[in-house]
Image (tube, helix red, strand yellow):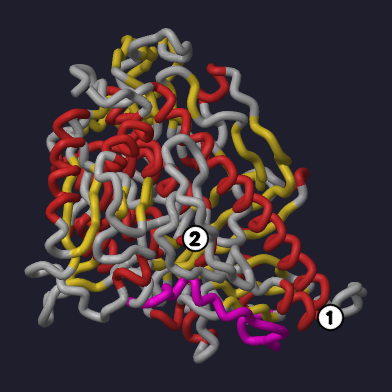
């Protein structure tokens, strides 16, 4: 393993998650964050099911703490469109994606909470790991080394904001998790492709007894549109903590113009109760972008999160896509740093995740346009080409994203195709059918006996994993040979053996193999290779070698 740590610029949710993911591979990291503490302002709220699957890999403490800050299910669906909280409801969308697909699809459960609570959980786990050096109150100034393909390490200049001391940090690699205005991305000259500054928003965190006026009309998002307020109210815990997003003109996008008192007036208009007295806790501002970086990897530098892509928030996929993309990249980076993979493996992070990011950007932007149309349709006296009901029907993808969450299929040199096709679905964005076709997330299947169920996902560790039928000793021997030749962990499990019984009798059908076949799963839980039945057992070693982009020793 590399003697020097990985430097992570940015200590938000994706940056801290990156540090946690690297601990799975025994990789040390230094997190450089200009804030003195984790977030106070709530910002993002949703950790979807796929992201919670990833969080399970960081240990039970992280997963259960995240589950402990979850909201009740009736605050996760539906999305409601109202004239005001106490006014007429003009439409709704059932947002099943925020509730989760259930135990047939995943052993994990999504949560709806707030970024300030999530970040603290990630921070605590990173500090407890003993592998993460958390340097909050430090700002990255310049990238000195690491952006060229020939560089074998990185160096950045940082300053301690309290003391003013400037120093150089050296590391094995650099991960840019420093957000929309990424210093690292700009230093490398990586362009953002797409639309910037589409709209301006004021984001207000406040406390008020809005729940009293919501009554039985709970929901994950309460969009309001009336002459006094247009925007969205977001419940954070169902106990008085709320967030709202207010669209403003560029001229009003200023704390001197759109003041805390303006926020209070807006909240009163949104709730429809003139004498409600909200306590404004903090006010933020942000611009809506719909962009994807031209590349996610340059030299020894990797872009993740908002440094790599920025989405309209209409879909709740921003941080989730960031963490899922980071999860794709970190096992590749770890193997590269350890000398067990060629540089081309890390390049597949861009190849595999850039199309997903572009797809998510496009749909999130479409969701935003539908919300705008609904707001126009619900405002009295404003003509619109579509009725409110028609627009709500067209907007059904908002909050219903299981296809992009679980069904993304990768095509790259880190995947060995087997000539099969993906399952057909009515809507690839919203609908998901489990498949073990190479390039797909390995399906969840319940294993074992009794009350202590085990998921196939629990078998996937920081190395490669082979799944086959019970008693198929030839695959176990092939895995042993390949692991020894390439110097990589290569576990092999026989489904049907002790403690791995196929509880529902669906494993072989869902994974598309006979008991004599085998599936190779990458460290990120995606299928890298598959053979329907036993044939040339050395194919396994050749598949791992191809993925790693290095010859078998």
Closer to the N terminus: mark 2 or mark 1? 1
- Residue 323 position, x and y percent, is 41, 47
Please say whether residue 350 is visible from this viewpoint. Answer: yes
What segment carries the magenta color?
84-103
Q: Is residue 545 above or below residue 354?
A: above
- Residue 37 position, x and y percent, is 32, 40
Q: Is residue 441 above or below residue 329?
A: below
- Residue 491 position, x and y percent, is 17, 47
Q: Which residue is mark 2?
A: 407
Q: Nearer the viewer, residue 5 or 38?
A: 5
Residue lying farthest left?
498
> Mark number for residue 387?
1
Neighbourhood count class around disc 2 (C-alpha, 10 Å): few under 14, some 14–19, many 20 upward: many
Asked if residue 64 lies in the magenta stretch, the reply is no
Identify the residue shown where x is 54% and y is 17%: 187
In the picture provided, is 523 more to the left or to the right than 271? Answer: left
Neighbourhood count class around disc 1 (C-alpha, 10 Å): few under 14, some 14–19, many 20 upward: some
Mark in the foreground, 2 or 1: 2
Residue lying farthest bottom?
216
Identify the residue shown where x is 46% and y is 35%: 413
In the picture provided, is 49 more to the left or to the right than 181? Answer: left
Q: Nearer the viewer, residue 415 or 57?
A: 415
């Amino acid at each position: 393993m590399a003697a020097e740590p990985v430097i992570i610029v940015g200590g938000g949710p994706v940056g801290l998650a990156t540090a946690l993911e690297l601990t799975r591979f025994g990789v040390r990291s230094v997190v450089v964050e200009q804030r003195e503490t984790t977030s106070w302002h709530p910002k993002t709220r949703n950790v979807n099911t796929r992201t919670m699957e990833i969080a399970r890999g960081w240990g039970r403490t992280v997963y259960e703490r995240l589950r402990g800050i979850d909201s009740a299910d009736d605050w996760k669906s539906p999305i409601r469109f109202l004239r005001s909280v106490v006014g007429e409801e003009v439409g709704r969308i059932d947002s099943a994606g925020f509730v989760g697909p259930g135990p047939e699809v995943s052993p994990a459960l999504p949560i709806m909470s707030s970024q300030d609570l999530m970040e603290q959980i990630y921070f605590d786990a990173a500090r407890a790991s003993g592998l993460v050096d958390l340097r909050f109150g430090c700002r990255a100034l310049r990238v000195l080394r690491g952006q060229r393909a020939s560089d074998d390490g990185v160096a950045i200049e940082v300053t301690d904001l309290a003391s003013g001391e400037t120093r150089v940090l050296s590391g094995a690699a650099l991960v840019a998790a420093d957000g929309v205005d990424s210093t690292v991305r700009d230093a490398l000259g990586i362009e953002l492709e797409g639309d910037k500054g589409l709209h301006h928003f004021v984001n207000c965190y406040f406390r008020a007894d809005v729940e009293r006026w919501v009554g039985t009309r709970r929901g994950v998002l309460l969009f309001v549109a009336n002459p006094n307020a247009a925007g969205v109210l977001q419940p954070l815990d169902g106990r008085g903590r709320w967030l709202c997003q207010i669209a403003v003109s560029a001229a009003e996008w200023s704390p001197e113009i759109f003041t805390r008192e303006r926020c209070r007036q807006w909240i009163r208009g949104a709730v429809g109760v003139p004498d409600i007295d909200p306590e404004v806790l903090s006010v933020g501002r942000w611009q809506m972008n719909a962009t994807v970086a031209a590349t996610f990897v340059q030299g020894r530098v990797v872009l993740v999160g908002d440094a790599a892509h920025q989405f309209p928030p209409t879909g709740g996929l921003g941080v989730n896509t960031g963490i899922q993309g980071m999860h794709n990249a970190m096992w590749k980076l770890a193997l590269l740093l350890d000398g067990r993979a060629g540089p081309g493996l890390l390049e597949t992070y861009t190849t595999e995740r850039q199309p997903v990011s572009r797809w998510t950007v496009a749909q999130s932007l479409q969701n935003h346009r539908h919300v705008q149309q609904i707001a126009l349709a619900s405002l009295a006296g404003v003509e619109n080409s579509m009725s409110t009901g028609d627009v709500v029907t067209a907007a059904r993808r908002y909050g219903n994203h299981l296809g992009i969450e679980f069904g993304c299929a990768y095509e790259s040199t880190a995947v060995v195709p087997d000539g099969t096709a993906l399952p057909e679905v009515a809507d690839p964005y919203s609908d998901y059918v489990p498949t073990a076709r190479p390039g797909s997330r390995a399906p969840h299947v319940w294993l074992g006996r009794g009350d202590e169920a085990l998921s196939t996902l629990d078998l996937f560790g920081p190395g490669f994993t082979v799944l086959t039928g019970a008693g198929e000793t030839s695959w176990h021997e092939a895995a042993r040979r390949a692991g020894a030749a390439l110097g990589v962990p290569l576990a092999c499990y026989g489904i049907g053996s002790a403690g791995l019984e196929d509880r529902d009798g669906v494993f072989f059908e869902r994974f598309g193999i006979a008991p004599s076949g085998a599936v190779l799963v990458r460290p990120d839980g995606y299928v890298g290779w598959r053979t329907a039945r036993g044939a040339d057992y050395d194919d396994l070693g050749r598949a791992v070698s191809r993925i790693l982009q290095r010859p078998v020793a």
